[in-house]
Amino acid sequence: MVEAKISVKDLNLFYSDFEALKNININFEDKKISALIGPSGCGKSTFIKSINRMNDLIDNVKINGDVFIDNVNIYENTDVIQLRKRVGMVFQKPNPFPMSIYDNIAYGPKAHGIKKKSKLDEIVEKSLRGAAIWDEVKDRLRKNALSLSGGQQQRICIARVLAVEPEVLLMDEPTSALDPASTLRIEELMRDLKKHYTVIIVTHNMQQAGRISDYTSFFLNGEVIETGSTEDVFYRPMDKRTEDYITGRFG
């Protein structure tokens, strides 16, 4: 039995009186890609934000249940800043800071106390290489990151997350705003990233989930209906609702 990197037990989340997540029990294996699929508004994005406690920033949110990372409960006596360093987040729309490419990547390490320029230079290059964009930007590191294409901006955002050396990457529809060629680049990148990180991706693109993920979980109305290997969930679903969603009968 493989030890889970992340283990979620009996997780419930409420926005005021609305129950957005209902009794979620799910494990995520280290150095694998897990895809979360399901119709809009079913709780996928809310769920991944509970893994690095971003929902703490929203008023009237109540959470009960447990989320363990390496067997430590992140909802008990956890330094949230350190947690978000360990569990990085990439959003749907690329959101580079309005500053140079270099300063985007160096921002996190500086915030965590690294000041030496030679060390920052090393981190910036390593992170940009890790996000498969170094060769495209190495001669224009002082240019504003907002001058890049959408696909390049998204890889800059991934490099910015990698710069603080996380263990887990959460990706909330990271390619939905990108063209097909950029989407393919990000998918190739994700396959490389899973050699070093636990990757959890929210996607509405069934083909994408099928192409890149090792495991898939189907969410519906705030519940996990089914979770398993991507091959099993796609080709041998146990629940009729999973089959109906994957085959396009609803959603």
Image: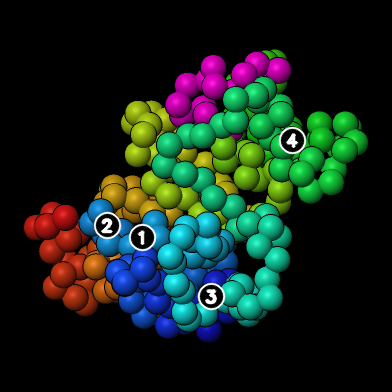
* Mark 3 touches mark 2? (CB < 8 Å): no
Q: Give the alpha-carbon distance from disc 4 to disc 2, as whole Å.
A: 35 Å
For marks 3 and 2, give the CA distance. 22 Å
Q: Earlier in the sequence, mark 3 or mark 2?
A: 2
- Along the viewing direction, whichever of 197 and 168 lies nearer the viewer: 168
Q: Is residue 51 visible?
A: yes
Q: Earlier in the sequence, mark 3 or mark 1?
A: 1
Above or below — where is 59 with respect to 9? above
List the residue tagged with mark 3: 67
Amino acid type at circle 3 is: Val
User: At x 29% / y 47%, what residue is drawn?
Assistant: 205
Magenta highlight on residue 152: yes
Q: Which mark is residue 44?
A: 1
> Could you tell whether 159 is left or right of 181 in the image?
right
Residue sitting at 71 percent across and 60 percent down? 82
Q: CA distance from mark 3 to mark 1?
A: 15 Å
Query: How would you rate the neighbour count of disc 3 (Cα within 10 Å): few for under 14, some for 14-19, many for 20 or more?
Result: many
Q: Nearer the viewer, mark 2 or mark 1?
A: 2
**Majority secondary structure of magenta residues:** helix
Residue holding disc 2: 41
According to the image, label 4 marks what residue? 106
- Please provide percent x and percent y for residue 251: 16, 55
Q: What's under tag 2, amino acid-wise?
A: Gly
Q: How far apart are labels 4 and 1 at the CA level?
A: 30 Å
Q: Which residue occupies 33% across, 62% down?
A: 43
Query: Which amino acid is tagged 1?
Result: Lys
